[in-house]
Image: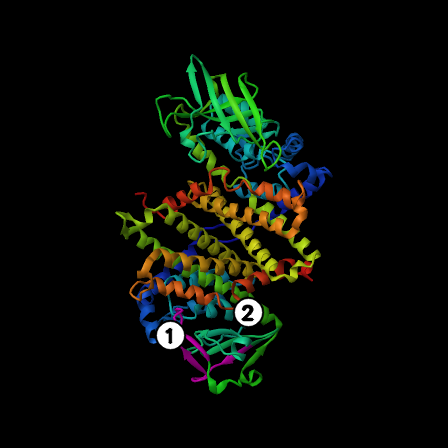
């Protein structure tokens, strides 16, 4: 057990910071206020990720045969921390490199790997995830979107909801039911569907979180070749479980929360609020939370770095990251006061982006169920 | 980065666990608490096996061996050991290069000016007193500290009535600012480490009980209302554990030690409240072991300004310049 970064890792973090100084436009703060799915951020992500790819950093944790450098997950976590902390200039492409690419590597056919992985590793493609449905939220296994196999095609009918990033996406990582007689976890498959397939209709769901944050995606006789099937037909549940282990801690929420908190402490000092013991107490509590969330995420990265099977540590890390993000989002409102009521103000932006944390990628209550059964071994009946 | 024990660390933990199986555990803690006694047998066993000096022995030019010492203290706390191991293994080596005679009790000047119960003070051979910019290392003789009855799981003592006008300038050695900073940091870390082992045991004990206790025709631990709260406690304990271990590894730097204490002492309250609530009435009894750990959690929260003190220290170290 030891908690040091290697000299190479420290150098890498410095290199990333220098790179960000150089590459981010002057109006980056404005650009990133809608989150990774915002129009300008999505457009910028294609330029930015291409530059990351040129440096060899975008998919450095991937195996060399897929365009990576075989770097340890620790190295990739440094990239995740530094980029998420300043508002994620990779836009939605953080998902590509974190879990969509690895899922294709693990379950994809040779043709799928050949087609998709180079696009991801050069930073030129945007993906979204088609998981939740109106009747399948936390209970994902209740999904109904149907893909009927007709000859060598699937005909997709149904709808997805709460989908982020799909207004700009080139592909959707789509969960469908391929066996109409099945229920729950069986009979589900993953399809890698081009978003320009006729019969796909995207509608924004206006929300208080931000512009173009949530969408519905409707499939009306959308027809795709069976070659878009990822992994075995009707066994997509395994594929998605594998993918979600990466996704649940994919966004380094604690890193952004820590940067936000540093700015909040500055604001509090400028306004003489550090004389208020309640503010000091909340700042201290929040800082400890950021550090705690960071370490639980590191524990998961350590398991991944050793190529061990995922454990419930992922859920522990996810829940605490959510707690941390939300606590700092609310503290921002209280320290910045009435000015935070203006849309896109510093506190407002941070608060809005934090508020979905407890729902995204499986509600906190689902994570707690998993901790109870897998970490504490508590009985079900 | 490596979150798994090295072979050496594994060997140390196996050795301490063997020793604790023989000399510690809740039954022994209950017996000693009932008599208001310190565990001299365990203390000597730790000394003889070399655990009391492990931090100094393992320290290298690259820094203190705080992590190994912290792992041992965590294990002793988990076993409910009635020994002042955190002060001996974590605080004393950081305050002075010279061996300080144990048992060691830790307190602040305020704790002497207005005498309050101090953990292990009635049995300590040395009192480390944290003042403003200095540490007083005070050898104690029998009778200077009087035992205090307490429900909070540790043998307590306070400055005896006859010694209320204790003269620190003549009472012992005085160490400077560096020692004071070291004592403050390592004491905070020690509180976090003690809290981790203690919370861990309290939670495990409760989980085991809730897996077998049946009400309404099913085990209590199968109710989702209980499972979620236990899961939240588990998150608190695990996060406290890794904060304390990382801070120990890096030599209890002020910010990391304060973060570890701030988090763990806050978690201690939650774990106390939840483990007692879920254990029901049996949880209040002496025959049920929970109190061995649970009551201690509240005692730890009384030292060095508790949660609020740790959070203040964290804010001052991280944003001190902004704060001024």
Residue B75 in the image: above or below residue A13: below
Residue at the image position 53 percent from the left and 30 percent from the top: A163
The magenta region covers B136-158
* Category of crowding for the residue at label 2, using alpha-carbon neighbours closer than 10 angstroms: few (below 14), some (14–19), many (at least 20): many
Which residue is the extreme one toward the top? A151
In this rendering, would B285 be left or right of B311? Answer: left
Residue A316 image offset from top left, x and y in percent: 45, 47
Chain letter for mark 1: B
**Mark 2 sits on what residue?**
B183
Q: Residue at x 47, y 70 (%)?
A: B87
Whether B290 is drawn above or below B154: the answer is above
Please state which of residues B200 and B289 is positioned toward the viewer in this rendering: B289
Residue placed furthest toward the right: A26
Q: Position of residue B16 (x, y in %)?
A: 38, 63
The residue lying at 31 percent from left, 67 percent from top is: B286
Find disc 1 in the rendering and name its residue: B38
Instruction: Give residue B42's position: percent from left, percent from top.
Output: 36, 70
Residue B303 drawn in magenta: no
Residue B140, magenta (yes or no):
yes
Residue located 42% across and 17% down the image: A148
Q: Estimate how packed mark 1 is, as few (under 14), some (14 to 19) or many (20 or more) residues with alpha carbons within 10 Å.
A: many
* Quadrant placement of the C terminus of chain B: bottom right
Residue B245 seen anywhere in this rendered image of the structure: yes
């Amino acid at each position: 057990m030891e908690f040091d970064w290697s000299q190479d890792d420290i150098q890498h973090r410095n290199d990333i910071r220098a790179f960000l100084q150089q590459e981010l436009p002057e109006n980056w703060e404005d650009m990133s206020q809608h989150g990774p799915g915002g129009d300008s951020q999505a457009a910028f992500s294609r330029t930015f990720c291409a530059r990351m790819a040129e440096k060899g950093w975008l998919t450095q944790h991937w195996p060399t045969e897929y365009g990576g450098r075989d770097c340890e997950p620790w190295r990739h976590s440094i990239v995740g921390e530094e980029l998420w902390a300043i508002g994620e200039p990779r836009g939605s492409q953080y998902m590509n490199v974190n879990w969509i690419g690895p899922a294709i590597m693990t379950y994809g056919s040779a043709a799928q790997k050949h087609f998709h992985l180079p696009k991801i590793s050069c930073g030129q493609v945007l993906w979204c995830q088609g998981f939740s449905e109106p009747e399948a939220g936390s209970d994902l296994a209740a999904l109904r979107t149907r893909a009927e196999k007709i000859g060598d095609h699937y005909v997709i009918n149904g709808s997805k909801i709460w989908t982020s990033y799909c207004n700009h996406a080139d592909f959707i990582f789509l969960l469908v039911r391929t066996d109409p007689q099945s229920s729950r976890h069986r009979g589900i498959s993953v399809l890698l569907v081009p978003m320009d397939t006729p019969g796909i209709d995207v509608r924004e769901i206006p929300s208080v979180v931000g512009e173009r944050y949530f969408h519905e995606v409707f499939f009306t006789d959308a027809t795709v070749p069976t070659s878009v099937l990822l992994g075995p037909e009707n066994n997509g549940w395994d594929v998605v479980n594998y993918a979600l282990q990466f996704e649940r801690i994919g966004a380094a929420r604690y890193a952004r929360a820590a940067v936000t908190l540093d700015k909040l402490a500055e604001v509090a000092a400028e306004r003489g609020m550090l004389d208020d013991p309640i503010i000091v107490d909340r700042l201290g509590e929040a800082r400890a939370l950021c550090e705690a969330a960071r370490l639980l995420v590191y524990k998961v990265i350590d398991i991944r770095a050793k190529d061990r099977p995922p454990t419930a540590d992922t859920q522990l890390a996810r829940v605490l990251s959510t707690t941390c993000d939300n606590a700092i989002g609310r503290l921002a409102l209280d320290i910045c006061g009435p000015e935070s009521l203006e849309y896109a103000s510093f506190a407002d932006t941070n608060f809005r982006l934090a508020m979905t944390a407890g729902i995204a990628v499986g509600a906190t209550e689902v994570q707690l169920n998993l901790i109870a059964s897998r970490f504490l071994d508590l009985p079900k009946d | 980065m490596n979150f798994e024990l090295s072979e050496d660390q594994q060997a140390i933990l196996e050795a301490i666990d063997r020793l604790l199986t023989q000399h510690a555990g809740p039954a022994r803690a209950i017996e000693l608490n009932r008599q208001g006694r310190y565990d001299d047998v365990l203390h000597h066993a730790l000394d003889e096996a070399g655990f009391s000096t492990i931090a100094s022995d393992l320290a290298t030019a690259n820094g203190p061996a705080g992590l190994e010492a912290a792992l041992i203290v965590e294990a002793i706390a988990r076993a409910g050991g009635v020994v002042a191991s955190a002060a001996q293994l974590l605080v004393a080596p950081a305050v002075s290069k010279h061996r300080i005679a144990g048992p060691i009790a830790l307190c602040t000047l305020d704790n002497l000016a207005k005498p309050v119960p101090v953990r292990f003070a009635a049995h300590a051979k040395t009192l480390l007193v944290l003042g403003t910019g200095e540490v007083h290392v005070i050898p104690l003789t029998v009778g200077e500290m009087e035992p205090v009855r307490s429900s909070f799981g540790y043998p307590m003592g306070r400055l005896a009535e006859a010694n209320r006008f204790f003269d620190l300038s003549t009472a012992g050695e005085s160490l400077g600012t560096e020692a004071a900073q070291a004592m403050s940091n390592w004491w905070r870390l020690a509180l976090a480490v003690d809290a981790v082992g203690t919370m861990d045991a309290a939670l495990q004990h409760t989980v085991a009980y809730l897996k077998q206790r049946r009400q309404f025709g099913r085990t209590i631990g199968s109710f989702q209302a209980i499972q979620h709260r236990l899961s939240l406690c588990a998150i608190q304990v695990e996060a406290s554990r890794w904060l304390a271990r990382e801070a120990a590894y890096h030599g209890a730097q002020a910010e990391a030690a304060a973060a570890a204490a701030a988090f763990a002492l806050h978690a201690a309250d939650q774990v106390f409240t939840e483990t007692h609530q879920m254990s029901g009435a049996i949880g209040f009894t002496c025959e049920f072991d929970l109190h061995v750990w649970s009551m201690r959690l509240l005692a730890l929260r009384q030292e060095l300004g508790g949660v609020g003190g740790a959070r203040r220290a964290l804010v001052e170290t991280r944003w001190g310049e902004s704060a001024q």
